[in-house]
Amino acid sequence: MNVLLLGSGGREHALAWKMSASPLLTRLYASPGNPGIGRIGELVKLDVADHSAVASFCKEKKIDLVVVGPEGPLVAGIADDLRAWGIRVFGPSKAAARLEGSKGFTKDLCARFNIPTAAYGRFSDLASAKAYVEKTGAPIVIKADGLAAGKGVTVAMTLPEAIAALEACFDGSFGAAGAEVVVEEYLTGEEVSFFCLCDGATALPFGTAQDHKRVGDGDTGPNTGGMGAYSPAPVMTPEMTERTMREIIEPTMRGMANAGAPFAGVLFAGLMITDQGPKLIEYNVRFGDPECQVLMMRLKDDLLVLLNAAVDGQLAHMSIRWSDETALTVVMAARGYPGTPEKGSVIRGLDKAEGEGVQVFHAGTAINGGALVANGGRVLNITALGKTVGEAQAKAYAAIDRIDWPQGFFRHDIGWRAVEREKIAG
């Protein structure tokens, strides 16, 4: 198979790495890709916003499958346009991608199909939103309705924080994404990422992970796109998984089909496991980043076989095998992130970091004058397998110690919750 992978981050490098192990793969193209992906596939320059240009490339190169990594092209309808050209695509339609593209759409779907989620209000003007927040009180959650690169959510512990978050949305800090705002009840519990492969009719559970969103140790500082993750998530017991499928995923699949937008692709449910059970925080319509990296490390099956089954409506006949080991990834970020990151610093020693059970996935990297340099906020994902979370954590941080990049920083406590559990369990 000839495959075109769209995207440039750590998620896409992990997908490329896993697909490259498939005997089905003939040739892998990636646009724009990154230097890590460039070691296992051919990087091509395409304007992903120009869907006809992408389609022309697919026809020229006899592409058998397009795998869309990030959410932006999906929300813009690239899957629909490529399918109209007769090109097979792994990823949801524009109508189905509204599950991520509009938080208000998803909340209304939850209300319509009795999917457990936080109580909420939707607002398109500052005055009404402020009145709601002042009446409800803090803590409270403020979300820009549209896509904001993982940074449009504020968990406000005080009223002034909440008002400031509302003002930021309506002042244009998130562009068009903040033109409408969703204000949600603050949920308490343990957060978890739950994934399903979907083909429009069947949703097949595809692993669990726990992400670390805050930039600093001890879950401090502003939210980021994710500073690290581990898989599996211990809180997702077989019983909790069954409840999540029955109470959240299956009603969503039925609701989307009823709306004329059956969901096919990756359905990524951000959950809060509360005293009452699982509640939906939000949906994403692509693999998580950095959750994808730990899932790919643990996946024992051929990823291309599974993606083809999703595209061809054959998931009802599939099962998925996972390693019993834990995978843990630590994000190395450029100084300044999640604000304006410093670009251009040289990174050395990646060959020393990789080894048995350790992979370094590139995220925001580039080649400049023959040297590998930082070219984004989240730059590297150091990912390790271990028999326990503690062992995977130790291997990941030992690998980081072998990387020579003084301008990079990282959290020192990825996996802390699970490591504490392991210590208590003895």
Image (cartoon, rainbow, N blue to C red):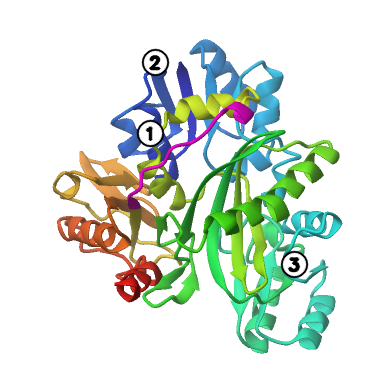
Quadrant assignment, res 15:
top left
Q: Mark 1 — residue?
A: 18
Secondary structure type for disc 1:
helix
Residue 189 in view of the camera: yes
Q: Pinpoint residue 159: horizontal percent, then vertical percent.
A: 68, 88
Q: Pinpoint residue 97: horizontal percent, then vertical percent.
A: 69, 43
- Left or right for 285, reference 389: right
Quadrant assignment, res 397:
bottom left
Secondary structure type for disc 3:
strand
Q: Which residue is drawn at the image coordinates 79% and 42% (left, top)?
A: 254
State the residue in front, 219 or 9: 219
Q: Pinpoint residue 218: horizontal percent, then vertical percent.
A: 39, 78
Answer whether labels 1 and 2 touch (C-beta < 8 Å). Answer: no
Q: CA distance from mark 1 to mark 2?
A: 14 Å
Specify which label sits upstream in the sequence, 3 or 1: 1
**Which mark is on residue 182?**
3
Asked if 22 appears above or below 256 in the picture, the reply is above
**Which mark is on residue 26?**
2
**Which amino acid type is marked by label 1?**
Lys
**Which amino acid type is marked by label 3?**
Val
Specify which label sits upstream in the sequence, 1 or 2: 1
**Which mark is on residue 65?**
none
What main secondary structure does the magenta stretch of the protein show?
loop
